[in-house]
Image (tube, rainbow, N blue to C red):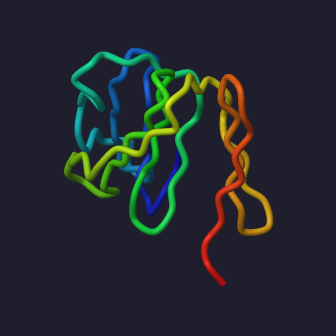
């Protein structure tokens, strides 16, 4: 995923890598998104300076965008998520094993 001049690669085994999009130079190498070793099938997305990495364990791991790796938090939907989210008309659509969520900001 390309965001703010950096290319982020989320591997299915839970590692995130980051490269400078112009030069291809590694910004940071393999960093584990979660200690639990969750698997990742869905694509990450970015918004407002953070990267969202949805894991198959039902948690979405929030990583600060930029040249240094830092996990900012975790959001849980409580059930398996394998499908990549969709973004349309200011809303985020997330399909889990048993539900479809529509998440949008206030206003």
> Which residue does the image show at 74% across and 39% down from the upper left?
100
Give the residue drawn at x 69%, y 46%.
101
Side of 65 where 84 appears, left or right: right
Given residues 26 and 69, the one toward you in this image is 69
| Residue 68 on image: x %, y % | 20, 51
Q: Residue at 65% of width from left, 65% of height from top?
A: 104
Left-right relation of 104 to 26 = right
Q: In the picture shown, does residue 99 fall above or below 45?
A: above
Looking at the image, is 34 positioned above or below residue 85?
Answer: above
Residue 57 spot, x, y in % from top left: 45, 22
Q: Nearer the viewer, residue 52 or 8?
A: 52
When asked about the image quadrant of residue 41, the answer is top right
Residue 65 picture quarter: bottom left
Task: Give coordinates of residue 70: x percent, y percent.
Answer: 21, 48
Quarter that holds the C terminus? bottom right
Q: Residue furthest right?
A: 89
Name the residue: 27% across, 19% down.
36
Q: Which is more toward the observer, 69 or 77?
A: 77
Q: Return the x and y of residue 42 as percentages of the image width and height.
A: 59, 29
- Direction bottom: furthest residue: 107
């Amino acid at each position: 995923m390309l965001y703010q001049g950096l290319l982020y690669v989320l591997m299915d085994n839970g590692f995130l890598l980051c490269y400078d999009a112009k030069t291809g130079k590694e910004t940071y190498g393999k960093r584990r998104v979660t200690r639990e070793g969750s698997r990742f099938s869905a694509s990450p997305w970015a918004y407002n300076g953070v990267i969202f990495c949805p894991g198959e364990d039902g948690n979405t791991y929030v990583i600060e965008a930029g040249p240094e790796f830092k996990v900012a938090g975790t959001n849980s939907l409580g059930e398996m998520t394998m499908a990549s989210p969709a973004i349309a008309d200011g809303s985020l659509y997330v399909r889990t094993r048993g539900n479809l969520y529509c998440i949008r900001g206030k206003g």
